[in-house]
Image (spheres, rainbow, N blue to C red):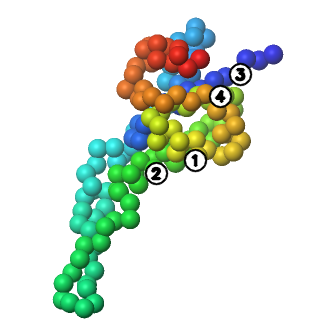
Amino acid sequence: MKKAKLWYVIADGGRARFVARDDKGAFRTVSSFVSTDLHARSSDLGRDRPSRVNESASPGRSAIEPRRDLHEAAKEDFIKIVAEQIEVEHDRGQFDKLMLVAPPGVLTELKKALSKPVAKLVAKKLQKDLTKVPDHDLAAHLAAAH
């Protein structure tokens, strides 16, 4: 019987990578992604000034609060892109099980963004930001989750 192939999805709101173990058990990054909006200024993401509205009873004008923070919107979009790429890799048969590793808010959003069939393949979740941890140091961080 073939051993199930486990992939580790390590992400935050602007970086993600897919990691698998090689034949010797060492962690190796299969692919990685960095959001183009990771270090963008708010003015680069959209309007830097809130919209204005005229008062009906006076000549004054008031600023309108944006409906959502532009950096949060960029993070949500990036999480959706990562989830879509997980779906593509699943369709290619690259993994049988997943372990999601991300900070709490990102972990929740990433799991929600996955289709039901792929979400069922999530064997474990770890609430940690390991995006900057090199492959050779992952074993120490992931040992507690196994």
- Above or below, comparing residue 48 to residue 25 in the picture: below
Residue 65: image location, x then y, percent: 31, 67
Residue 113's mark?
Answer: 1
Residue 49's mark?
Answer: none
Residue 123's mark?
Answer: 4
Q: Mark 3 points at which residue?
A: 4
Marked residue nearer the N-terminal end (3 or 1): 3
- The amino acid type found where label 1 is placed reads Ala
Residue 77's mark?
Answer: 2
Q: Distance between the residues labelled 3 and 1?
A: 23 Å
The quarter of the displayed image where residue 100 is located: top right
Residue drawn at x 81%, y 16% as measured from the top left: 1
The quarter of the displayed image where residue 61 is located: bottom left
Marked residue nearer the N-terminal end (1 or 4): 1
- The amino acid type found where label 4 is placed reads Ala
Note whether residue 79 is visible: yes
- Discs 3/1, front: 1
Q: In the depicted view, which residue is nearer to us: 142 or 85?
A: 142
Residue 56: image location, x then y, percent: 28, 90
Mark 4 residue element:
strand
Note whether residue 88 is visible: no
Mark 3 residue element:
loop
Crowding near pointer 1: few (<14 within 10 Å), some, many (20+)?
A: some
The quarter of the displayed image where residue 98 is located: top right
